[in-house]
């Protein structure tokens, strides 16, 4: 790692990162972290320099960058404890509103990320949380059978309806998981509800032709399923469930059938009165 010539290396690099009004601190943090993990061992001076720089940048970067840094350091045996603790603390600190916002951010980040970044999020998700998720009991085998049957029949609508019940999420999210053209959300769902690998593979082959027609994609999703811990899948599912529950606002989102019936009755009432008067 190249040393800055200024007397205070951290201030020098941060000033450089903000030069010309363009904030490249997220890129800087990713680069120095990648360089750090490329070497199996570091001198005390090198470790101190990395820790000072990382701690100074972590609070200034965005949530996605922190997840990437957590994932990078998670697989490095010599990761400095101070940096890991800082990342974990920022991931779990704050009031309930901030935690909820973070969960929404993670959900949006996951669905908008490319496959490689999704994998990093999933296999290292436990790094970003301090409390492991509670184990989710496998769903009834009948629901899994219905999911497989819907996939065989290439019926994404029915698959979404069954998945909504199996995961305890809302219909919009179930449809989003079903229609995803990369497949990682289906893998998360399968691992979280206790689905077997061979059943998942059959679903991947039939449910979505974009996935099923790519042997490489199916292979990578199989590998992700084997690599993904139940705890990480269950934690992501917990976030999805929490997000769905928080989005439900009965007072603001009335039952469509009830609303339609009310409109019909309201519109029909004057007509009915006129008929009775005659």
Image (cartoon, grey):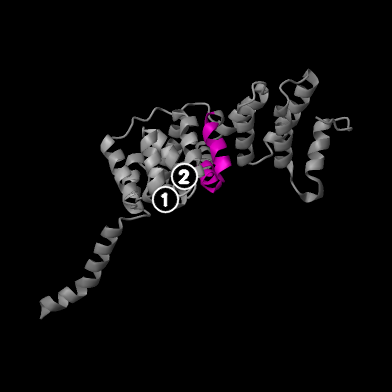
Q: Is residue 80 magenta?
A: no
State yes or no: discs 1 and 2 in contact (Cβ < 8 Å).
Answer: yes
In the shown orientation, is residue 105 left or right of residue 212? right
The percent position of residue 63, horizontal first and vertical second, equals 61, 40
In the shown orientation, is residue 14 left or right of residue 200? right
- Give the magenta part as a residue range: 104-126
Query: Can you identify the residue that label 1 sits on?
Result: 208
Q: Residues within 10 Å of mark 1 (few under 14, many from 20)?
A: many
* Secondary structure type for disc 2: loop
Name the chief secondary structure element in magenta.
helix
Residue at 30% over, 59% down: 256
Residue at 54% over, 37% down: 119
Query: Which residue is at the far bottom?
Result: 278
Q: Nearer the viewer, residue 266 or 56?
A: 56
Residue at 32% over, 43% down: 148
Query: Can you identify the residue that label 2 sits on?
Result: 183
In which quadrant of the rendered view does residue 190 lie?
A: top left
The percent position of residue 219, horizontal first and vertical second, equals 49, 39
In the shown orientation, is residue 212 left or right of residue 162? right
Residue at 62% over, 36% down: 68
Q: Could you tell me if residue 242 is visible in this image? A: no
Q: CA distance from mark 1 to mark 2?
A: 9 Å
């Amino acid at each position: 790692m190249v040393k800055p010539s200024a007397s205070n290396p951290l201030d020098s690099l941060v000033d450089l990162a903000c030069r010309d009004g363009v904030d490249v601190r997220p890129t800087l943090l990713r680069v120095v972290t990648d360089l750090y993990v490329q070497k199996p061992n570091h001198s005390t001076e090198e470790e101190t320099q990395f820790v000072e720089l990382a701690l100074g940048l972590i609070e200034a970067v965005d949530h996605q960058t922190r997840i990437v840094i957590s994932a990078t350091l998670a697989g490095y045996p010599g990761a400095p404890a101070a940096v890991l603790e800082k990342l974990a603390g920022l991931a779990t600190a704050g009031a309930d509103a901030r935690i909820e916002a973070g969960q929404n951010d993670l959900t949006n980040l996951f669905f908008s990320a490319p496959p490689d970044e999704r994998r990093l999020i999933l296999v290292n998700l436990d790094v970003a949380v301090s409390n492991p998720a509670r184990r989710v009991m496998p769903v009834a085998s009948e629901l899994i059978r219905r999911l497989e049957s819907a996939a065989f029949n290439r019926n994404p609508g029915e698959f979404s309806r069954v998945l909504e019940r199996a995961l305890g999420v809302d219909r919009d999210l179930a449809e989003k998981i079903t229609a995803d053209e990369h497949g990682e959300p289906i893998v998360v769902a399968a691992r979280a509800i206790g689905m077997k690998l061979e059943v998942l593979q059959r679903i991947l082959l039939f449910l979505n032709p974009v996935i099923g027609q790519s042997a490489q994609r199916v292979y990578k999703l199989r590998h992700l399923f084997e690599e993904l811990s139940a705890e990480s899948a269950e934690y992501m599912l917990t976030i999805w469930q929490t997000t769905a529950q928080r989005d439900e606002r009965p007072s603001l989102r009335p039952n469509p059938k009830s609303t339609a019936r009310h409109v019909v009755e309201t519109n029909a009432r004057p007509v009915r009165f006129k008929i009775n008067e005659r």
